Amino acid sequence: MGQAYFTPALFKFLRELKENNTSEWFKANQERYEHDVRQPMLGFILAFGEPLHGISAQFLADPSRAGGSMFRINRDIRFSADKSPYKTHLGAQFRHRAGSRDVHSPGFYLHLEPRGCFGGGGLWHPDPASLRKVRERMVAHPREWTGLRGKGLEVEGERLARVPQGFDPASPLAEDLKLKDFFTSTGFTEGQVCSGEFLELFVEHCRAQVPLMKFLVKALDLPW
C-alpha cells in the first residue's frame, strides 16, 4: 500500500463549495482549501513526476503553486452567463514540453469531482492547423489509428456534423475524421482516489494511453 495523497475532506470541500459558490464563503474557508485541496494535489503532482518521466520525458508534472500542472480553481467568467466564481472540481494537466503553457496541447489529465473522478489523455480543442495534422495522419496511417481500438482505447470528443472539407466523405474513417477532440478517459471512485493505491492506478491509466499519445505527438511533429 502506497501513500494516500487525497482524503474525503477534499470531496467534502467541493460539495460544500457547490452549495456556497461565493467569494465570501471561499474566503472564510481558505485554510480548508489550502490544507484539504491544493496541498494534496500539489503533493500528488510532485510524486507523479518520476513515473511520468518513465512514460515519456517530454511530459511535465509541475508542482508550482501558480502556472504549474494544477488548474486554478477560479473560473474565467468574462464571457460566461454563469458568474459563479469557482470551479466545483479539481483538475491537473500534464502537458507536452512543447506546449507546456497551452491547455490545448497533448497531455494527460486528472479530474477530481464528487461522483465524477476520471483520468484522461489526448488532445482537447486543438487549433485548426493541429487538427488538420491529426486527421492527415489518420488517413496516412489508417491501421495505426484503427489499431487503437484493438488496444482497448475508445477515442472520444466532439464531432462535426459532416466530414471536414478536403477529406473523403466515403472514407472508412469518415466518422473519426469528424472528431474535433481526441481523448480517452477512465473513471475512478472517490474511494480509489483516497486510497494509497491511487498514484499507481493513475500511472497505469496513463501507460494505457501511450498508443494514442504517441499517435498525436507524431502527428504534430513533436518528440516522444
Image: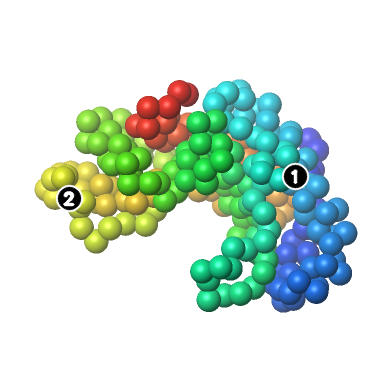
Q: Is residue 77 above or below residue 99?
A: below
Disc 2/disc 1 C-alpha distance (Å): 43 Å
SS class of the residue under badge 1?
A: loop
Q: Which residue is mark 2?
A: 165
Q: Image point 88% across, 59% down: which residue? A: 31
Q: Position of residue 183 (x, y in %)?
A: 44, 46
- 198 on left or right of 144: right
Q: Residue furthest front?
A: 78
- Of residues 212 and 63, which is closer to you in this image? 63
Q: Position of residue 15 (x, y in %)?
A: 73, 69
Q: Position of residue 162 (x, y in %)?
A: 20, 58
Asked if residue 211 can be seen in this view, the reply is no
Instruction: Compare marks 2 and 1 and give the one earlier in the sequence.
Output: 1
Q: Badge 1: how crowded within 10 Å, few (<14), some, or many (20+)?
A: few
Q: Image point 28% across, 58% down: which residue? A: 160
Give, as a three-letter code, the residue at label 2. Gln
Give the image quarter of residue 8: bottom right
Q: Is residue 175 above or below residue 83?
A: above
Q: Image point 54% across, 30% down: which residue? A: 97
Specify the quadrant that holds the N terminus.
top right
Q: Which residue is mark 1?
A: 65
- Of residues 43 and 98, which is closer to you in this image? 98
Give, as a three-letter code, the residue at label 1. Arg
SS class of the residue under badge 2?
A: loop
- 219 on left or right of 76: left
Q: Badge 2: how crowded within 10 Å, few (<14), some, or many (20+)?
A: few
